[in-house]
Amino acid sequence: MSETPAPAPAPAVRGRRWMLYAPLGLATAAGAGFLVMLRGLQTGDYNPRGVPSALLGRAPPDFSLPPLDASDLPGLSAADLRAPLPSPVVVNFWASWCVPCIVEHPQLMRLSRDGVPVFGINYKDRPADAAGFLTRYGNPFRRLGRDEPGRIAIDWGVYGVPETYLIDRQGLIRWRYAGPMTPEILDQDLRPLLRRYA
């Protein structure tokens, strides 16, 4: 007696088999992406802090911020960043509740001591807390605007504080750094750009 051939698998069973391969495909894609990232770290092409910005090479968005109530510093507006500027300007988004802002603050103080204009935008902070921060750690800012609701930070594309921008003498954004600026970032990245755009 001859054996009857087994029936072909139903389409639903075949579809389930492909679902078993989906996690394998995802894992393969993630592994390939990780290898590309590692290769970029080795060659220096990948910067984990290098956040792309649509504003690079453009003027800052229009804004006008009031001064910090407890400060003698003037507020900050887009007009203060328009060409021609006497020198490049550093704009720093910060807050008193931001622990990484404490880490980067000595670098801002160094820039200020070296004569680099540092303008601050205080982000989602209480004026009294911001003033206390500056009393405790020092004030590097020539101008300081208060962005209590955080609307201006959104317009600039800020991901979180601290975040730092370099504006050249023509009033164009030339550099953006998300995260606390370390001495290495200051010396290796920002200072060469300050010289280039001076």
Image (cartoon, rainbow, N blue to C red):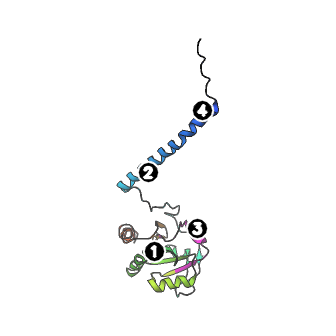
Above or below 4: residue 189: below
Residue type at tag 2: Phe
Q: Earlier in the sequence, mark 1 or mark 4?
A: 4
- Tell which tag, 3 or 4, sits nearer the viewer: 4
In this view, the residue in front, 183 or 67, is 183
Q: Secondary structure at mark 3?
A: helix
How far is the residue under mark 3 from the one under mark 4? 48 Å
Label 4 Cα crowd, 10 Å radius (few <14 / some 14-19 / many 20+): few
Above or below 37: residue 126: below
Label 3 Cα crowd, 10 Å radius (few <14 / some 14-19 / many 20+): few
Q: Earlier in the sequence, mark 1 or mark 3?
A: 1
**Residue 186 shown left or right of residue 160 in the figure:** left
Q: Which residue is mark 3?
A: 154
Residue 84: x and y, percent? 48, 74
- Tell which tag, 3 or 2, sits nearer the viewer: 2
Residue 96: x and y, percent? 51, 79
Q: Magenta stretch: give its range.
A: 144-164
Q: Which residue is mark 1?
A: 89
Q: Are marks 1 and 4 in contact (CB under 8 Å)?
A: no
Q: Place residue 192 in its image quadrant.
A: bottom left
- Tell which tag, 4 or 2, sits nearer the viewer: 4
Q: Earlier in the sequence, mark 3 or mark 2?
A: 2
In this view, the residue in front, 96 or 47, is 96
Residue sticking out furthest to the top: 1
